[in-house]
Amino acid sequence: MNKRKVVVIDDDRLILKLLLTTFSQNGWESKGAENAREGRKLISEFNPDLLVLDLYLPGEWSGLELLRILKQEGKLKDMKVVVITASDSGRYLNQCLESGASMLIPKPFSPKAFLNQVEALFTSKEA
């Protein structure tokens, strides 16, 4: 079986590194970006199974705007999306789900619990 692939987009370098390390140590092929434009390029080149996307990003697009762009481009058909945010997650939940996210996870989170939630996204669809 091929390794699952993930792209993590977060401008917080500590969280970015934490998630990339967590995924890599658990058998995922992982790549990261600190802004939406760089992340969009990675998504096109890497074709991930999963996108972990921070809601607030520096630059011209927020995470939500990037999510809407990817949905319009049809890139979310074969990719699950987990949005992460340090802000009031309840405020953005419906917008994220309507834009194509599979779930929204508030920061801070436990890397192990985060990975378990992500794995459940894949096993529930495959079962």
Image (spheres, rainbow, N blue to C red):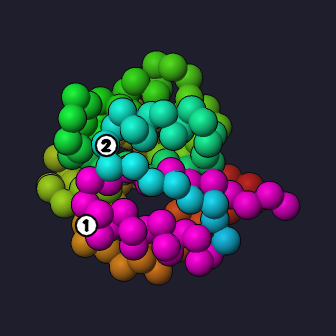
On whether residue 19 falls in the magenta region, the answer is yes
Name the residue that disc number 2 marks. 35
Residue 16 lies, in percent from the top left, at 36, 63
Which element type, helix, strand or loop, lies under badge 2?
loop
Label 1 – label 2 distance at C-alpha = 18 Å
On whether residue 93 falls in the magenta region, the answer is no
Instruction: Report the side of 32 relative to 6 (left or right).
Output: left
Q: Is residue 55 above or below residue 66?
A: below
Q: Give the range drawn in magenta.
A: 1-26
- Pick the residue in front: 118 or 70: 70
Tally the marks. 2
Q: Is residue 109 above or below residue 4?
A: below
- Pick the residue in front: 61 or 89: 61
Instruction: Report the side of 107 relative to 6 (left or right).
Output: left
Taking the spot 67% from the left edge, 62% from the top edge, the residue there is 123
Taking the spot 45% from the left edge, 54% from the top edge, the residue there is 32
Residue 121 lies, in percent from the top left, at 57, 58
Q: What residue type is labelled 2?
A: Asn
Q: Quadrant of residue 44?
A: top right
Name the residue that disc number 1 marks. 107
Q: Which amino acid does label 1 sit on?
A: Lys
